[in-house]
Each structure stands twice: as structure tokens, then as C-alpha cells.
Image: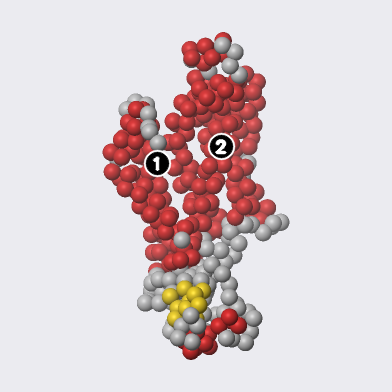
Amino acid sequence: MKLSPLNRRRFERFKANKRGWWSLWLFLALFVLSLGAELIANHKPLIVSYDGQWYSPVFKRYPETTFGGEFPLEANYKSPYVRQLIEEKGGWMLWPPIPFDYASINYDLDVPAPAPPSIQNWLGTDDQGRDVLARIIYGFRVSVLFALTLTLLSSLIGVIAGAVQGFYGGWVDLAGQRFLEIWSGLPVLYLLIILASFVQPNFWWLLGIMLLFSWMSLVDVVRAEFLRGRNLEYVRAARALGMQNGAIMFRHILPNAMVSTMTFMPFILTGAIGTLTALDFLGFGLPAGSPSLGELVAQAKSNLQAPWLGIAAFSVLAIMLSLLVFIGEAARDAFDPRK
């Protein structure tokens, strides 16, 4: 895709910010790795060779009877009995680098949980014997996917609301501003606590509740751009030529308004991750047992005798949020009209 001269200059300015440029690549690398979390951390082998046949337990469930067992339940590949069945037929298993997923428990610990870092558990275990590194990988993926989805949906709603207010003005703008003042004054955390007593929170439930309030962050920015742009000469000319209001808004004024919107989106993404982490820490976020960075922070608070929990939680949150802030700063410099 060929970039316009303006976008090419923006890209060069973004690339000139070395901190933001390398932060973008590092964040993308971490995110891509987390998307393949099942191939990195799993309590099932990647490949099983048995009696000349190949099996992929990561992608498909196989009953124990497939390998000569007695029960039609899913095979436990860490069981000595299943291992013996596979090895008797000259088979073997290829395990991922971390032989635990976010929910699997290490029953072979030499010390009580939470266990310190070891060869088996690189970052130790939590107080339930679950591998910390596996939970970080899965929790990183959940946090980023949640924040990306929330950012995109809230940006879409916020841009539309701000565009309508700014373009039409008058009573539409006045009513919209009064609604925003009332809606933004509602205590979001208290509402989440009240609703959590009626409904079991999950990924989509939390996304919907947070979307009700997060869309307001971009309304004022887009509204200001449309208030300024609706009186420009090219907009008046388009209106005089009989162009529809929708075409004027989204074909002519919106591209200019998106400049300021794009600079805010990395910071909205950072705020969404922080909000989800805070809710999980307080116990009003994802369901119990879900891979969650906030739940790891809560475990670190409850187990001060296990400093590796606090160090791991702080490190992953600090790195993730710092990378996003650096990317946002580079994007802000790239889209700055003064430059």
C-alpha cells in the first residue's frame, strides 16, 4: 500500500522516535507470542507418536482408550500409566517449553505452595500450585485482547457521538453535553460491585459494562474538531453543492479529526488494561481461576513471604504499560500538526 506524502512524513517521525519504534516492535512480539500461549505453556504435549500414528493433544482431545487405556475419559499425559502405554508401543511425546497451562496444578512440589522459582516452575507457583509464568502469558493475552476490543468499540462510539454533537451544534450539542455531564458523574466502580452481586462477571459482561462509560474519553476531542471544521471553506462549498451531511461529516471532516483521535488511542488502551487489573485485584473482574494479572497482584499482597509473586506481577505490568506509553508518545509526536 502506497502512503501519501503526509502519511509518509508521519511514519518517518514515528520511526525517528527510537524509544517508541522499538517499543512497538517489542510489544507486538510479546503479543504475538501470547496469542500462541497454548503452544508455549500447556499441560498437554504438542505431539504424541503412538503405534505409528501422530496425535496433537493441544488441538484435539483423545480418550485414554486411544492409547490402549481402559477409560473413555481424556488421557492424562503426565500420568505414569499413560506414559507407559505410549512407550510400550515405541511412542514418544513432545512437550511445550512450559508443561503447565494457567489452570494446571503442579502436584510434585517439594515445598508447600507458593513455591519459589525452580527448574520446573521458572517464576515459581502461586498459593494454589499453579505456574506463575504460564498464568502471566495467558493473562497478558487476555488483558491485551480485552483492552484492544474495548478501545476499538469505545473509540467508534465516541467518534460518532462527538461528530454528531460538533457538526450539528445547537440543541443537539447542548443536550449531548448535559447527558455527558450526568453520565460521567455516575460511580462506575460502585455500579460494577452492585451488578457483580446479581451476575457472575465474565469477559463479555465486563466489556459491556466498561463500554457504557469508556466511550466518553474521545467525545470532547472529536467534538472540538467538528466544531472547528464545520465552518471551514471546503465544508461550506460541499454543503452548497448539495452534498449530504453524512458524507460531509465522515468523508471530509472526520479524517482531520482522526489525527487527534489516533494520538489518544494508546493511552485509552493503557487505561483499559489498568482498569481490568484493578477490578481483578478487588475481586470484581474476571471469574475466579481465570488467567489474570490483577489476581496475581492480589496473591502477591496476600503472600508477602513469597516475593517472587510481587516481583513478577510488578515487572509484567510495568513493562506492558511502559511500552504502551512510549508508543503513545511516538504516535503523538508523529501526528502533531505543529511538526
**15 or 181: which is nearer to us?**
15
- The answer to whether residue 103 of the structure is visible from this angle is yes
Give the mark toward the camera: 1 or 2: 2
* Residue 147 point in image, percent of width and height: 51, 49
Q: Please tell me in which quadrant of the rendered image residue 179 appears.
A: top right
* Quadrant occupied by the N terminus: top left
Q: Earlier in the sequence, mark 1 or mark 2?
A: 2
* Quadrant occupied by the C terminus: top left
**27 or 38: which is nearer to us?**
38
Is residue 70 shown above or below 311?
below
* Residue 53 point in image, percent of width and height: 50, 77
Give the crowd class for mark 1: few <14, some 14-19, many >=20 residues within 10 Å: many
Is residue 258 shown above or below 120?
above
Is residue 312 shown above or below 105?
above
Is residue 314 shown above or below 21?
below
User: What is the tally of numbered marks visible in this picture?
Assistant: 2
* Residue 320 point in image, percent of width and height: 41, 53
Find numbered disc 2 in the image and state the secondary structure of the residue it sits on: helix
Q: CA distance from mark 1 to mark 2?
A: 19 Å
The residue under the point 52% across, 11% down is: 237
Q: Amino acid at mark 2?
A: Leu
The residue under the point 35% across, 39% down is: 330
Which residue is tagged 2? 156
The residue under the point 59% across, 36% down is: 157
Which residue is tagged 1? 328
**246 or 326: which is nearer to us?**
246
Q: Amino acid at mark 1?
A: Gly
The residue under the point 43% across, 84% down is: 110
Q: Is residue 328 left or right of residue 250?
A: left
Find numbered disc 1 in the image and state the secondary structure of the residue it sits on: helix
Q: Name the residue furthest right.
A: 198
